Image (cartoon, rainbow, N blue to C red):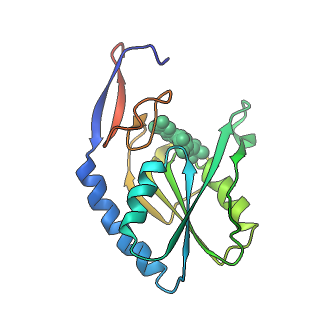
Amino acid sequence: MSNRPYHIDVMISAKSIAARIEDLAREIKKEYSDTDKLVVIGLLRGSFVFIADLVRELDMNVEVDFLEASSYDDGTESTREVKILKDLRGAIEGRDVLIVEDIVDTGHTLTAVTSLLKSRRPNKMKTIALLDKPSRREVDFKANWTGFEIPDAFVVGYGIDFAQANRNLPYIGSVVFEDE
Ligand code: 5GP
């Protein structure tokens, strides 16, 4: 589908994203005000720009780690499996942790990742997603913080790809196929 001609409409500007991240960082600092060193975990690859901007707004002690999960659909939604392709480098037992995701869509990825990481017994674990598409949810999941709720559109930019392209756009845009 990547050779179908398309253009990208700006949905959320770089300026709006930056302003929202400042607000979110303020709330996160308040939530973790007693934390000695926060472990910020980015889900690869889509969250890499978001986590980079977010940690620079968190003027507190942070460590950064990454996890890569891939979900695949075997045809029946209820048996959707999430595989860990790249695990964390560090242990999180007893630590205060923040999981950073680009988009909550069906909810399967964060449901599986939070359940896996909870089993490693962190002290406190919260989640933040830049984008949320509530209308697409298949399992009940709500991140502790959400940047923006968006409609059911295929989005790119600010770390998020279409067939590995467009991750370097500074804004969030929606893909519009010319033949639609
Ligand atoms: P889910 O919540 O369905 O388990 O999966 C969330 C993941 O689906 C996101 O991390 C992202 O990789 C992918 N995803 C969901 N919506 C979009 C989208 O609009 N564009 C892109 N590129 N990926 C998406």
- Vertical placement of residue 133 versus 30, above or below: above
Q: Is residue 20 left or right of residue 134?
A: left
Residue 62, given in percent of the width and then of the height, sits at 50, 71
Can residue 153 be seen here? no
Residue at 31% across, 60% down: 20
* Residue 168 found in image quarter: top left
Residue at 76% across, 66% down: 119
Residue at 28% across, 32% down: 9
Residue 125, given in percent of the width and then of the height, sits at 60, 71
Residue 112, given in percent of the width and then of the height, sits at 69, 53
Q: Quadrant of the C terminus?
A: top left
Can residue 119 be seen here? yes
The residue furthest bottom is 34
Q: Is residue 136 left or right of residue 153?
A: right
Residue 149, given in percent of the width and then of the height, sits at 39, 51
Residue at 32% across, 68% down: 23
* Residue 66 found in image quarter: bottom right
- Vertical placement of residue 73 versus 4, above or below: below
